[in-house]
Amino acid sequence: MKRCVQIFSRLRGVLIVTSLALAVVAQESPSHKQNARPGSSAATPASRSATTSGSAARYSYEFTQPQFYLRHILIEHDASGHGKVTFERLNEEVPIVENLEISPTALGRISALWQALRFLDSDTSYQSDKQFPHLGTMKLTMTDGEKKRTAEFNWSNVKEAAELTKEYRRIADQASFVFDISVARENQPLNAPKLMEAFESLLKRNALSDPQQVIPLLKEISSDERLPLIARNHALRLLAKIK
């Protein structure tokens, strides 16, 4: 029964999925801008300049803005990109928790940014002089042995810190799409066309962590006869764009 309530709650989020693209745009700049299933297989990082599979370091990104559609995001992972992503949506009480496998390509970018910041050895404040609290609060945390540091800010002029938060936001948006389309395939296939439109919007704005990681899922969608033909054809077009 608890599982049914949880699925019902999540389905409401699918009905307003188009607000996701608008919310993300609002967070990309101060001028009103602002994975699990396709990455479920183990991934070995292609670039390990800052992290290695044998490292005990742990990393996390947290975003909070109670008025946004994705009002709370928490991404936690180890040096190999294994972890979980948790997100809470507007007007929903039950958080969604999905296993996370960051792709080698994305992990390479993320690792390089952590290294460039020299995060644990630095006490630099990443908060810009000008405040943008309406865009939400972000927290970056790294733990390695007895060392731990958290940096909190709502806007940063430090290039590496800003890029790192964008990388994690891409992970969250990709995971959100994967979850929504999976629920739609099981319970509400008529929502699939709108979800595919939202996915294409993310793809065009380079707002996905690694589109290559979603290829297996798009192939499944393109041949899933439970879904409307328009959604299946849309998946085929997106596959061609990604390839």
Image: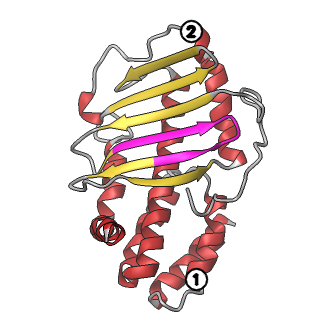
Report the number of discs.
2
Element at badge 1?
A: helix
23 to the left or right of 218: left
- The residue closer to the viewer here, 160 or 142, is 142
User: Disc 2 marks which amino acid?
Assistant: Ser
The boundaries of the magenta stretch are: 72-85
- Is the C terminus in the top left, top right, bottom left or bottom right quadrant? bottom right
Residue at the image point whose x is 73% and y is 28% from the top:
55
Q: Which label was assigned to residue 222?
A: 1
Is residue 157 shown to the viewer in this render?
Answer: no
Image depth: mark 2 or mark 1 in front:
2
Report the predominant secondary structure element of the magenta stretch. Answer: strand
Residue at the image point whose x is 39% and y is 43% from the top:
73
> Taking 166 as reference, is 228 above or below it?
below
Residue at the image point whose x is 66% and y is 37% from the top:
109
Q: Decide: marks 2, 1 in contact (CB < 8 A)?
A: no
Q: Does the magenta stretch include residue 168?
A: no
User: Disc 1 marks which amino acid?
Assistant: Ser
Element at badge 2?
A: loop
Identify residue for label 2: 122
Residue at the image point whose x is 68% and y is 29% from the top:
112
Q: How far apart are marks 2 and 1 (CA)?
A: 48 Å
Q: Is residue 79 magenta?
A: yes
Percent across and percent down for residue 60 are: 51, 33
Percent across and percent down for residue 18 are: 32, 64
115 to the left or right of 152: right
